[in-house]
Image (cartoon, rainbow, N blue to C red):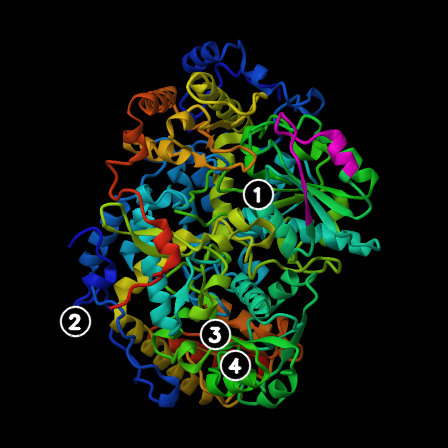
Amino acid sequence: MTTTQLIFEHSKRGRRGYRLPALDVPEATELPSSLMRDEIVDEVEVSEVDVIRHFTRLSKLNVSIDAGLYPLGSCTMKHNPRLNEEIARTPGFALSHPLQPDHQVQGNLALLWHIERTLMEIFGMPRVTLQPVAGAHGELTGILMVHKALAKSGNARKYILIPDSAHGTNPASAAFAGYQIKELKSNSRGTVDIDTLAAAVTEDVAALMITVPNTLGVFETDIKRFADILHEKGAYLYCDGANLNSFVGIARPGDMGIDVIHSNLHKTFSTPHGGGGPGAGPVGVSQTLIPFLPTPTVEQREDGTYYLDHSHPDSIGRVRAFNGNFNVLVRALTYMRSMGPDGLRRIAQIAVLNANYIRARLRGSYHLPYDAPSLHEVVFSDKLQTAKDVHTLDIAKRLMDYGFHPPTIYFPLIVAGALMIEPTESEPKEELDAFCDAMIAIARECEERPELVRSAPHTTPVRRLDEARAARQPVLRWRK
Amino acid sequence: MTLPDPLTDQHRYISNASQDVGEMLKVIGIDSIDALFETIPADVKLKELLNIPGPWSEIESRRWFRALAAKNLTAVDHVSFLGGGAYLHYQPACIDQLLLRAEFLTSYTPYQPEVSQGTLQSIFEYQTHQCLLTGLDVANASLYDGSTGLCEAVLLAERVVRNRTKVVIAKSVHPQYTETVRTYVQNLGYEIVEVGWTNDGRIDTAALREACTNDVFAVAIQSPNFLGVIEDYDAIAQIADAAGAVKIAVIAEATSLGILTPPGAHGFDIAVGEGQAWGVPTQYGGPFVGFMVVKDALKRHMPGRLVGETVDVDGKRAYVLTLATREQHIRRGKATSNICTNEALIALAANMYLSLMGKEGLREVGQQCLSKAAYLRGELQKIGSVILPFSGPVYNEFVVRTPFPAAEILADLEHAKILGGIPLGQFYDGHDNEFLVAVTELHTRENLDHFAAVLTAAISRERR
């Protein structure tokens, strides 16, 4: 058995990985054979031992936050406390069913009510929907609410303004909500100019969708004036809260004039990223958008009991079946309670300190395309290394040989050859130093042994892949 | 509450303490953490701490959260017959243990394939399972759930069949799925046409034929449908084909694929659904995992991530995210979907479940569900005033009608520690005396007999 064999290639006729109790009722034969399938051709036959070995060996091909710094910018790869896992597995939560009547799930409804109250306080906003299950899902929800609110007042308008530094999900979500996109050019600081915005906000603009701080980690200092400009024209200010980790407990979106914000609970609130999900993307709204929240909402009666309220005639409707990613919300609330108000503030302080420490240590070795003070992440480029024909991709791959997951690369798009580094508050100084030492060593290698960097990685389970071949002749499943 | 001193404040999930902070500030060349936040205007900065509880120790958290969980009435100490898109099936013990491996749990999207082969290969395997089970060609790495999966399928269909404005959705598709589609497409100018069912609980094919005009871009049906009844794929495909519409099959009970003929074998273009039944806890509705499998011709319209096979520079087989030009991080406003974060860990759990159960186990689970549901139906039919209103074929779920409001009957069952079903009246007008009952391999004959006995007693009590 080798690590690269697929589970299907381990299959041997007659092997079993399960046992069910013997059938204790007569075997049903009433279905017509036209509705029944033949055997599932090529489906696997393996034992439990085979399965455990296979997935354990597969797992060893991954790096993870538990093994060390995982500095993917904009992803907030922080420590995932195991208490959160334990609480989510409490049978009373894990075995509850989404269509149980309210009186049977008072514990769940109380939990949803408490996490909404906690997020309302963190956002500084009067209501939060917990239904969206990812950041992009929250974006769609938020923009649909803006659309409905504007349509209700007579004109849904045509455009969403989005800075050129934004995450790709922003324009995609706005498009699916029914809008056209107008891109705003960043200034030399990487932020949005008041004048650029003022000129772009016409009666046709529904909202500005902006990430705060932006994808360079730079805070939009004029954010309150942005809000004023938009509000004056009857437009809304949407905040992509992907970077909330940098200012949680320090400042609140609601106090900045923001009308809608989504927060990725798998980022700021530590729910595990799981190789790509699940997440949760609750959305906070200002007073004027409350009537348009997805249904149902969770409400509390005077006697202290809770219920799901479906009676919101102006709601955009539901954005997912059932009650969102409930057990991701359980993990996030566990984390919020573990941290408390001082801990949440501490997160932002140390996350920003850690990023600025990396920035200070690496700025002699790598080009810093935007020099404005940054918060929780720092974006370098490969400008100094391209002289030796070594590029961001090479630097990223070489980092793997030093035992680190690379940063986010080639994003934001406004930086050529971007290396976007977000260490989070979890990292101890020693880990940051080891990472900086590795980056500095690589910068030296780029000068002295560029071929070593260009041909990296050298120590990983597989080396550089032929990605063009994967796309040109797609093989998207195993065949016998 | 006044603000704590940033030099000495300390929390268990944050390593750096006062000595580290002091050293780091020196390297940065500033003398306080506050100096790092000068770009945030003073007038929006908080002057005090947030008004929220905590910090709590693990001991306090356990106490509070366990007390909340204890307020729920669940399958922990009740026998549950709840389904309706979330099913309680056998969960092999090793799955959760494997999911807790940090390399799976705490890694992210495999953008760097050299250090993510574990996740990538597992997604490739998951995609293969989906293809084998549905009889279609190309599966993606996962979507949020069944409801948003149906939204994505409808949007995909519209991209393929341009310049048409209507989508036909069976009224017997999970009502919350259809509600979600309504939300998704509200500004896109499509019309949703619903088609009801006939006495057997199957879609009304005459009404379907009438609805399938030449401005319909897709027909979406669910099988087994929300009433538990298995649809006739061929009859539906024929009608949709005549209109040139994309055929979408929704599967909300994924274990049905172990025993029922799959949509791919009947010419359907897209199979989309909810993978929760593959051993994922019902956990009040999430996280679940949406799956989508399409015909090869549709692969470049697919939403979400796809993993493909390739080789590395040494010629070694390896896996990588591919056909990414469909996706939002490249195509931005013109992407096939806005999805980024998906349900990868749940897809991994599904891969493990499907591998453990395997060819024989998936069939046996299906056969046991089918047989136990048939047995319970038989027992219920012996009760004089119980009617099973739909005569069509069923898998493991069916509608029960009594002469009394479902809520009252179910309250009686709850009293006997049975979560007896889902009242249908909340989804369909005029069905207040009906509820949906789901049976799985976890039910014993004793559970089923007890259900029938308690229901009999409940009905006679209501009569008095």
> Are labels 3 and 4 on one chain?
yes
Q: Estimate the x, y position of residue A50 in percent, counting from the top left.
A: 19, 58
Give the letter of the chain under mark 2.
A
Relative side of B167 to B75, left or right: right
Residue under the image location 49 percent in, 20 percent down: A356
Instruction: State whether residue B370 is above or below residue A416.
Output: below
User: Which callout, 2 or 3, points to the residue nearer the camera?
Assistant: 3
Does the rendering let one see residue B442? no
Give the letter of the chain under mark 1.
A
Magenta segment: A181-199
Q: Distance between the residues labelled 2 and 3?
A: 33 Å
Q: Mark 1 points at which residue?
A: A115
Q: Name the residue under label 2.
A: A14
Q: Residue B269 carries which label?
A: 3
Relative side of A407 to A13, left or right: right
In the image, residue A238 lies in the stretch drawn in magenta: no
Q: Distance between the residues labelled 1 and 4?
A: 37 Å
Q: Which circle's residue, 3 or 4, is located before the other in the chain?
A: 3
Q: Which circle's residue, 1 or 2, is located before the other in the chain?
A: 2
Crowding around mark 2 (Cα neighbors within 10 Å: few <14, some 14 to 19, many 20+) is few
Q: How many marks?
A: 4
Q: Please tell me whether mark 1 sits on a helix, a strand or a loop.
A: helix
Residue under the image location 32 percent in, 77 percent down: B368
User: Which callout, 4 or 2, points to the residue nearer the camera?
Assistant: 2
Q: Name the residue under label 4.
A: B400
Q: How far apart are marks 3 and 4 (CA)?
A: 33 Å
Q: How far apart are marks 3 and 1 (CA)?
A: 41 Å
Type of the residue with mark 2: Gly
